[in-house]
Image (cartoon, rainbow, N blue to C red):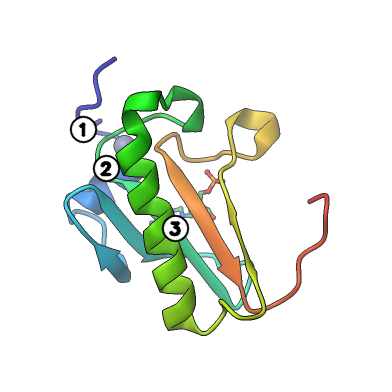
Amino acid sequence: MTRDRVADCPFCRIVAGEIPSTKVHEDDAVLAIRDIAPRAPTHILLMSKDHIASAADLTVEDGELLGRIFASAAGIARAEGIADRGYRVVANVGAWGGQTVDHLHFHLMGGRAFNWPPG
Ligand code: AMP
Ligand code: ZN
């Protein structure tokens, strides 16, 4: 499956710099930005730079990408001061999972307590 840029994908456009964002981390595979509609005091999105439609499209070959994403999330959590009390990293998949942007991203949320299970 191709992972080339998709012209009308908002996160491909953010990665390309065509839509402005507040970046908190960037490397050659991962971009982390502040969510435009935060649902917690800290709400950051970590996205692949390549277009991957969702977490359902990940394979064992993506192990390094996922390691980078989770290591980046942990580093950002420390930098944001949310690591000690704990935080949540979550990927929504598909309509019932709450996914609204079909480009792989993980929500890093903290600064308040969360319910389990989520609503
Ligand atoms: P999901 O619903 O899990 O697909 O998450 C998509 C997230 O992207 C939502 O939390 C949106 O608020 C966020 N979002 C959408 N457009 C932008 C944007 N241009 N910049 C930052 N965050 C965005
Ligand atoms: Zn995309």
Q: Secondary structure at mark 1?
A: loop
The label nearer to you, 1 versus 3, is 3
Q: Secondary structure at mark 3?
A: strand
**Is ligand 1 within 8 Å of the beta carbon of the residue shown at mark 3?**
yes
Residue that carries the numbered disc 1 in the rendered image? 5
Residue that carries the numbered disc 3 in the rendered image? 45
**Is ligand 2 within 8 Å of the beta carbon of the residue shown at mark 1?**
yes
Q: Earlier in the sequence, mark 2 or mark 1?
A: 1
Rate crowding at label 1 as few (under 14), some (14 to 19) or many (20 or more) other CA atoms within 10 Å: some
Marks 2 & 1, CB-CB < 8 Å contact: yes
Could you say which quadrant of the image residue 98 lies in?
A: top right
Cα gap from disc 2 to disc 1, whole angstroms? 6 Å
**Is ligand 2 within 8 Å of the beta carbon of the residue shown at mark 2?**
yes
Q: Amino acid at mark 2?
A: Cys
In this rendering, the answer to whether 61 lies above or below 71 is above
Identify which residue is drawn at 46% across, 78% down. Answer: 78
In this rendering, the answer to whether 91 lies above or below 6 is below
Q: Amino acid at mark 3?
A: Leu
Where is residue 66 shown, x and y percent of the image?
Answer: 39, 43
Identify which residue is drawn at 67% across, 35% down. Answer: 97
Residue that carries the numbered disc 2 in the rendered image? 12
Seen from this angle, which residue lies furthest top? 1
Cα gap from disc 3 to disc 2, whole angstroms? 13 Å
